[in-house]
Image (cartoon, rainbow, N blue to C red):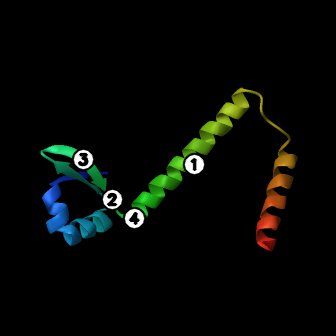
Amino acid sequence: MKVNIRPSADLRNHYNEISKQCKETRDAVIITVNGRGDTAVLGLQDYYQMKSELELLRTLADAEDDVENGRVGLIQDSFDDLRKSLMKRKND
């Protein structure tokens, strides 16, 4: 991911340009205040993707911790629980 650096005044004065750049290039734009990085701007699609990937990584880390600490169960029990949960969600 390429990073572009712009002063905070650009965010106020050239918002549409920055927004378009984030969407089209899928690159983040770093907004600076007094020459120092302050805020990162990225397209909404990229934000949601990053958030989903982070959630997946946390889930995988939790699962790895469960395995390392012996908190495991039969796969059939897991599938049964998942099936019940999905059926309940479908009926709600």
Residue at 82% from the left image edge and 48% from the top image edge: 78
| Residue marked by disc 2 | 42
Mark 3 neighbour density, 10 Å: few (under 14) some (14–19) many (20 or more)? few
Closer to the eye: label 4 or 3: 3
The CA distance from mark 4 to mark 3 is 19 Å
Q: Amino acid at mark 4?
A: Leu
Find residue 22 and report its horizontal and vertical position in percent.
Answer: 29, 63
Indicate which disc residue 81 carries: none
Pointer 4: what residue? 44
Q: Marks 2 and 3, Cα distance to the nearest angstrom?
A: 14 Å
* Tag of residue 38: 3
Amino acid under disc 2: Leu
Task: Check if mark 3's residue and mark 1's residue have beta carbons within 8 Å.
Answer: no
Rendering quarter of residue 72: top right
Label 3, secondary structure: give it.
Answer: strand
SS class of the residue under badge 4?
helix
80 left or right of 69?
A: right
State which quadrant residue 47 falls in: bottom left
Q: Earlier in the sequence, mark 3 or mark 1?
A: 3
* Residue 16: % across, % down: 22, 72
Reading the chain from its start, which is encountered first: label 4 or label 3? 3
Is 32 situated above or below 73? Answer: below
Residue 39: image location, x then y, percent: 27, 51
> Which residue bears the numbered disc 1?
56
- Tell me which amino acid carries mark 1: Leu
Separation (CA) of disc 3 from disc 1: 27 Å
Give the camera-side residue of 43 and 10: 10
For image coordinates 81% across by 66% down, the residue present is 88
Looking at the rendered structure, the secondary structure element under dot 1 is helix
Q: Nearer the viewer, mark 2 or mark 3?
A: 3
**Viewer-nearest of labels 1 and 4?**
4
- Residues at marks 2 and 3 touching, judged by CB atoms closer than 8 Å: no
